[in-house]
Amino acid sequence: EIVLTQSPGTLSLSPGERATLSCRASQSVSSSYLAWYQQKPGQAPRLLIYGASSRATGIPDRFSGSGSGTDFTLTISRLEPEDFAVYYCQQYGSSPDTFGQGTKVEIK
Amino acid sequence: QVQLVESGGGLVKPGGSLRLSCAASGFTFSDYYMSWIRQAPGKGLEWVSYISSSGSTIYYADSVKGRFTISRDNAKNSLYLQMNSLRAEDTAVYYCARRIAVAGSDYWGQGTLVTVSS
């Protein structure tokens, strides 16, 4: 099973700032099958990024993903008020699928 | 539009059983893999199981293997999760999600809460 470790656990930033979230895998993620999800309180997760760097339908271009192998990054170029949430990475290239423990982006 | 609606959650005693359902609409259900993913109160996401479009390929997390059974009825556009021998640690919101091999889980339901308590 591939273990995903996200860092930091919490990121305290102000609107307009840049957010950089990390996801590290215990072994190489097959075909860069790495996704990022956003979850707000009381809501289901929403797919942001798949294939490490492809934005899902309707996702603003301030969200970008990068990385390959074992190291992946989600960048939010300029935080909007609606971006404060919890973000999860997931690998779906090797069964079982696994999730990271999440990074909370909170308002400073 | 794609819709996934879970049902069947509730309060059950340890050792009991529950069957969750997920009704799908707005897409050709029989073309897609489907997953169950859960989230314990205040915790992160945990993948539980997925099933291929035909039902021939199934995977489970080790934490539920031997206790949970995923299935689907393509004629009814429905996904199921039979949960037996439930434990307190199975308490969670259970989400169904459409799984795409190259794109992860692109649509999720709103979830159904399962509480295992005496």
Image (tube, coloured by chain):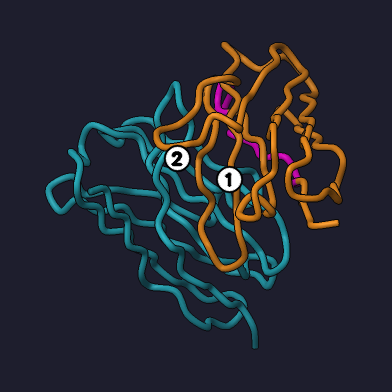
Chain colours: A orange, B cyan
Query: To which residue does mark 1 refer?
Result: B47
Contact check, label 2 and label 1, Cβ < 8 Å? yes
Q: Nearer the viewer, residue B88 or A29?
A: A29
Look at the numbered disc 2 and give the secondary structure of its residue.
Answer: strand
Residue drawn 59% across the image and 52% down it: B64
Q: Quadrant of the C terminus of chain A?
A: bottom right
User: Which residue appears farthest toward the bottom when viewing the image?
Assistant: B118
- Give how far across and how far down residue B72 sits, in percent: 28, 48
Quadrant into which the N terminus of chain A falls: top right
Question: Does A71 sit left or right of A90 as displayed?
Answer: right
Q: Which residues are magenta?
A: A92-102
The numbered mark 1 sits on a residue in which chain?
B
Which amino acid type corresponds to the residue marked 2 in the rendered image? Tyr
* Quadrant in which residue A31 is drawn: top right
- Residue hosting label 2: B50
Q: Is residue A94 magenta?
A: yes
- Amino acid residing under circle 1: Trp
Distance from the alpha carbon under mark 2 to that under mark 1: 8 Å
Q: Residue at x 74, y 49 (%)?
A: A15
Left/right placement of residue A75 relative to residue A51 reads right
| Quadrant of the image occupied by residue B39 | bottom right
Q: Main secondary structure of the magenta part?
A: loop
Residue A73 visible (yes or no):
yes
